[in-house]
Every structure is written in structure tokens, then in C-alpha cells.
Image (cartoon, rainbow, N blue to C red):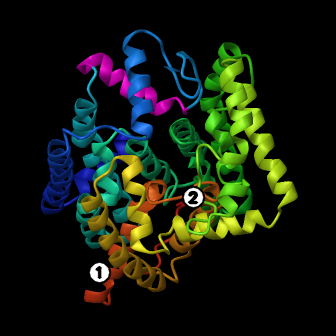
Amino acid sequence: MRGAWQRFIVDVPVRERWLVVGAMALSAALVLIYVLATRSREIAGDEVIYNEYGVFFTEGSLWHTTTPFGIEHASAWKPPGYPAWVGFWYSVLGVSPLRVEVVQGLLLAPLTVLLSWRLARRLLGAQVAIVAAFIVAAFPLVWEYFGMLFPEALAIPLTLATLLAVWGRPATPANAVLAGVLLGLGLLIRPTAFFLVAAVAVAWILAAGWRRGLGMSALAVVVAGLVVLPWTVRNFVVLDGFVPISVQESGAYGTFNEEAANDPDAPYSWRPLPEPYLPAINEFREEGLDEPALRSELYDLAWDYVRDNPEAVPKAFFYNGLLRFWEIRSPGAALDEVDFQGRSRAVRAVGLAMYYALVPLAIYGLWRLRRRRDIVLPLLALAITASLAFTLIAGTRYRAPVEPLIVIVAAAGLVSIFRRDAPLEPRPPVAAPGGP
């Protein structure tokens, strides 16, 4: 993989390299300005939990939290990846969300720009790649997460890295193993990362045919499972119960309940403590620290509701997987998410304005790319599975890992407006192993 990157960099013109460096510097600068401008803010929402995980890490209590019982305990409440990231930097730099945010701004924001440029250049050429790099660098719905304690800071570059391991590369065992490792790491950051599997499979089926494409995709899934397995075993040993990744896998309970279904203003909007389920949740708080049992109980509550109200599933898909996830709603509804998350309304407003401008360009870009089955079909598979994955809970924040892809397609549309001969024509197919 390193050799491929070295060869690629050598083949890139000097001017283009400097433009990429400029875009990377822009992204880092924007995050650092944001972090310093908001340094007096109070962390909020999930940031509080990740900060607590990090503090316990510095005390040698790995993956301990007081959530949700109010008492410190070994936990699988959150996926392990981001708590470990925060805990590592707290141990190295001292307990400070600000310092972690600076590190993310200096490392992860430029990395995201670099990966976006790399993917865009491989698929669509240098012009689209440079345009995409600068838009990703300036797009608040990408860079703001690097200036906060949110797992999206890791999920965004990991998503791009996973797609880079597959898209436009031959379906070989080595590439499948690499994709599987990256996918497994992504699952340990955000379990919803499984939505990438469909895009991986479609990309490799188009490149190598059904048999080999599905075979390498299956290998990647197996490797991802092996990456996750040690954490699952840890949970079984430490928590004395089955929790594959995190208790929050049972999050369907927050969407499938009478309170959410009958909310006239925000139907099927996820809530952490639905009124109908409070007695069961409070019972666990009073009786002990049994996360696996709580996970099982929350699962049962959600699926009991779905069995009694099967129409709730397509409705939740409509409101969450479509309207909320893809922002087909009023800007005010999207801005209302900010307060709970401790984010800046002004930055979110700028990000939404850019998003509403990028989406038409992306749609036009897809139309211009309609003959590029190697791009359009994996993107469609990814969009469908993402909508399904986020049927349980959706919002602007959860779309963050796919924002660079929206930007790349929008950049293709923008470039093609000014250059009708833009490099959007079909590429030669990826050579099969052993082929020419």
C-alpha cells in the first residue's frame, strides 16, 4: 500500500501537490480557528461521555464510565474506538478536550482532505480531485467534527480509507484483507459502518465478476469480524453477557415507541428516555450494573413495539432514513439538533447552506456520470444501505462519513459545467489478477 502511494505521489505534478497541501492546510486552519474561537464552550451531549471515558483511561480504568447507571463500571455502552482515542491523548497530553480537538485538527482534518483527493483523482481525474479537496477542506459539515469530541472525527477518514482500499482496485485477497481491517476498525468506531459492505461488494462485482467479487467481499466481512471479535470476547468476559460491540446497538427502542411515533412535530425522532419505557429503564438503574441485560431488555421493548405496529418500520425509514438523513426538511429542524450536541448554530447554518448548494451539483454530477457504472452503482448501493442503517436514528451528524462522497460527485458536476469534456468518461476496467 505504501509503495502504491509513493508511486502515485511521484506521478503527480508538482503544482497539483502544492494545491493539495494548500487544501490540507486550509482544513487544519479552519479547525484550529474554530477550536480556539469556541474554547470557552461547555462540552455537551455525547462529548460528556467521551470525556469521562478519557478521564478514566488516565486512571488506568480502561473503558469505564458512569453511563447509564450513574456509578463507575467497566462498560460497553459506547463502541471502544473513540473512547480509546480520547483516552490515549488524555494520557499523553493531559485531560483536555481542547488538546484532543487540536490534534484532530492537525492530523485528521488534513488526512480527510488527502484521502478525498486521492479517491476523487483515482475515479475522476486531477481537476475534479483538486476541486473536491478544497470543498472538503472548507465544508463545515466535514471539518467541524474534528473540533469536537465526536467519533465522526475518526469515522470520516476511516470511511474514505475503506473505500480507497476497494474502489478502482483489483479484487485480490490482499486488498480484501486490507478492506476488512479498515471496515472492522470502522465498526469499532461506529457500528453503522456496516452500510459500506454493499458498496464494497458492488464495486468488486463490477470489477471482477459475481463469483470473485462476492468472494473477496465475503473475505473482507470475515476479516472485519475477526477485528471486532476480541472486543466481543472482552465484553463477554468482563460484562458476563453477549454485547458484540456496544449496548447502543439496542438503540431501536428510542425510535420504536409510542412517544416517538405520535410526536406531531418530529415523528420517529430518536429519544434516549421514551416515556413508555421509563419504568423498565429505571428498574435496571435500581437493580444493578448489568449492561447485557439492559441491552436485551431494550431490544425486546423495540421489537415488541414493531411486532404490534409493523407500519412503524416504513414510517421510520421515511422520516429518518430519508428526510432526516438526507436533509429533506426545513433548515430550522436541522439547526435544532445543534443545542443538544453543543455545536455552533452559525457554523451549522453555513454548512447547511453549502450542503443545499452541493446536492443539486451532486445530482447533476450523477447524471453526467450515468455511463460510469463503476461509480454510480456503488454510490447507489451505499446510499440505500446508509438510509436503511440510519432508519433507527438520523440527523446531520450521522451523515458526516458520506459528506466527502457528496462533495466528490458535486465536484464532478461543477467541473463538467465549465468543461463539457471533463474526465467523466468510462475508464478501462480494473485488470484481473494475472491479467494484462
Q: Residue at x 43, y 9 (%)?
A: 60
Q: Amino acid at mark 2?
A: Gly
Specify start and end residues of the magenta stretch as a single range: 78-94
Cα separation, mark 1 vs mark 2, equals 33 Å
Q: Residue furthest bottom?
A: 420
Verify CB contact (< 8 Å) between mark 1 and mark 2: no
412 or 374: which is nearer to us? 412
> How many discs mark residues in the rendered view?
2
Mark 2 residue element: loop
Q: Is residue 187 magenta?
A: no
Q: Quadrant of residue 223?
A: top right
User: Which of the numbered marks, if any, corresponds to residue 44?
Assistant: none
Q: Is residue 364 left or right of residue 108?
A: right
Q: Earlier in the sequence, mark 1 or mark 2?
A: 1
Confirm whether residue 6 shows in the render: no
Name the residue that disc number 1 marks. 415
249 or 223: which is nearer to us? 249
Q: Residue at x 74, y 57 (%)?
A: 211
**How far from the left and from the top, in percent, is residue 373?**
56, 75
Mark 1 residue element: helix
Q: Residue furthest top?
A: 60
Confirm whether residue 118 shows in the render: yes
Q: Amino acid at mark 1?
A: Val
426 or 147: which is nearer to us? 147
**How far from the left and from the top, in percent, is residue 16?**
18, 62
Name the residue that disc number 2 marks. 435
Q: Is residue 85 magenta?
A: yes
Dot 2, how many residues are within 10 Å of its Cα: few (below 14), some (14-19), or many (20+)?
A: few
Instruction: Give the vertical position of 259 relative to 277 (above or below).
Output: below
